[in-house]
Amino acid sequence: MTLTLYNTLTRRQEPFETVESGKVKMYYCGVTVYDYCHLGHARACIVWDVIRRYLQFIGYEVRYIQNFTDIDDKILNRACVEHSSMEAVADRFIQAYFEDMARLGIKEADEYPRATHTINGILRLIHELENKGFAYPADGDVYYPVRQFAEYGKLSGRKLEDMQAGKSDRVNVDDPEYQKKKDPFDFVLWKAAKPGEPAWESPWGAGRPGWHIECSAMVRDRLGDTIDIHAGGTDLIFPHHENEIAQSEVVTGKPLARYWLHNGMVTVDGEKMSKSLGNFITIRELLDRGVDPMAVRLFVLTAQYRTPIDFSDEAIAAATNGWHTIKEGLLFGYQYGKKLGWDLETGYWGLETGNIPIPNTQYLVANPYVDRFQETVNNDFNFPGGLTVLFELAKELRRERNIIVHEGKTETSPDELKRQWQTLVTLAGVLGLEIEIEAETHKINSLSDTEIEAKIQQRQEARITKNFAESDRIRDQLQAEGITLIDSRDGTRWHRN
């Protein structure tokens, strides 16, 4: 079961082979911190979080770096509007980022370098480019001469001559930046300071770094010349990642990354979700509506990570229903383990928030569910296929739960049920689908048996008087409390979920 990945650079699926055996160096181009993160950001962060978790699950030691772009025109514009500072705006939205990602169950990266904290590395890289003839100063700016890099376009598949054909009518020849360039395709490495902007001293004058050079410097400083996985959204392939390659590989003479992985965009009615189009919803807005964070994760994981995924209320509702099914399976052991004679302390694991469960390995050896999960996911991180295994386990546990409730026994042996349950918890943990045990236990135990019976009696009286709205309200209230009602000719039975 060899892991194979689709590599944007080679445009084909390839076996995964790391620079150093058993170790993965992974970099994700993170967010520009001028506003709250939207669902498009959530998709990217969930995808790379789960990929990291899966690599750890199959035995790799992963060093995962994610940057923050904390100097940018958008950040400066917001600071100006708010009569604040670039640093204050960046700090506020970095804090908001961590709050949002914690709610989604995103594990923190090993390190979060910031562009403004990597100025020395940026200046060093520009200086090396200049020494090699791949950077030229122009009135305080510094530019990269694109045509000198023979391999430019190898990631995106774009050719300069093709882009040249349609570029002439889009160029503003009166633009001062355009006039500084030797060629319209050249991109900026260092920008001269404008009045009132934050600036750093450099050999070319006071200024600030261009966007593309930041990531090249942060990758090199934190992970070295060549990394295993460089990740980001498809919207970054050109020009950002193309320019990173041009900058880094000229200096090191080595590939910047062995595998370039790109997640698809979140769309709304077929259009990319973005702040510029105004068709976005922030993560906190969605979660504050009452949408379960795990339903958001499930929504993201139902699509192959490289393809677009369309957001709608219907899609979130379907993901919520799917999460309820998996959650029922995850709760099975806590609800019925004692009844089945399980010892959940011996040979078990701690379910700590953000950590992958580490079960007693006897439950994973020669386990057909685990084998099918790995075989499926090893095909370019096919998480939708992996979810199929989780749903199969959850539905089997739900069937056994119903038998326990109605007949007081199970059709499957307690040991096999324990194996299935621990397998589900483990594989769900790999996908970051986790339950808050204390909150769920409180919900389940919030009503006494006497109170439940009283509610059922009130519902029966409402049905007799044909007050079906009240009857439905009581049923939904009990369901929210973790109580399921089963109506039959003999009356109404109930059980705790």
Image (spheres, rainbow, N blue to C red):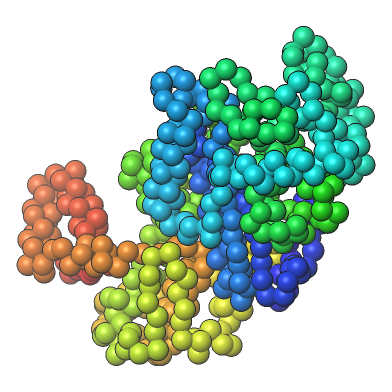
Front residue of this view, candidates 80 and 344:
80
Drawn side of residue 77 relative to residue 450, left or right: right
Front residue of this view, candidates 456 and 248:
248
Q: Quadrant of the N terminus?
A: bottom right
Outermost residue to the top: 174
Q: Please state the horizontal and vertical placement of residue 388, each as a whole percent of the image.
A: 55, 66
One can see residue 134 in this view: yes
Q: What residue lies at 66% left-to-right and 66% top-to-bottom?
A: 24
Is 65 placed above or below 115 here?
Answer: below
Drawn side of residue 58 relative to residue 281, left or right: right
Is 50 placed above or below 289 here?
Answer: below
Q: What residue lies at 76% left-to-right and 20% top-to-bottom?
A: 139
Q: What residue lies at 10% left-to-right and 67% top-to-bottom?
A: 448
Q: Please state the horizontal and vertical placement of residue 413, each as a whole percent of the image.
A: 40, 90
Q: What residue lies at 28% left-to-right and 75% top-to-bottom?
A: 335
Front residue of this view, candidates 45 and 26:
26
Q: Quadrant of the C terminus?
A: bottom left
Front residue of this view, candidates 457 and 192:
192
Q: Please state the horizontal and vertical placement of residue 114, each as a whole percent of the image.
A: 55, 45
Is 220 placed above or below 235 here?
Answer: below
Q: Quadrant of residue 328?
A: bottom left
Drawn side of residue 380 relative to residue 134, left or right: left
One can see residue 320 in this view: no
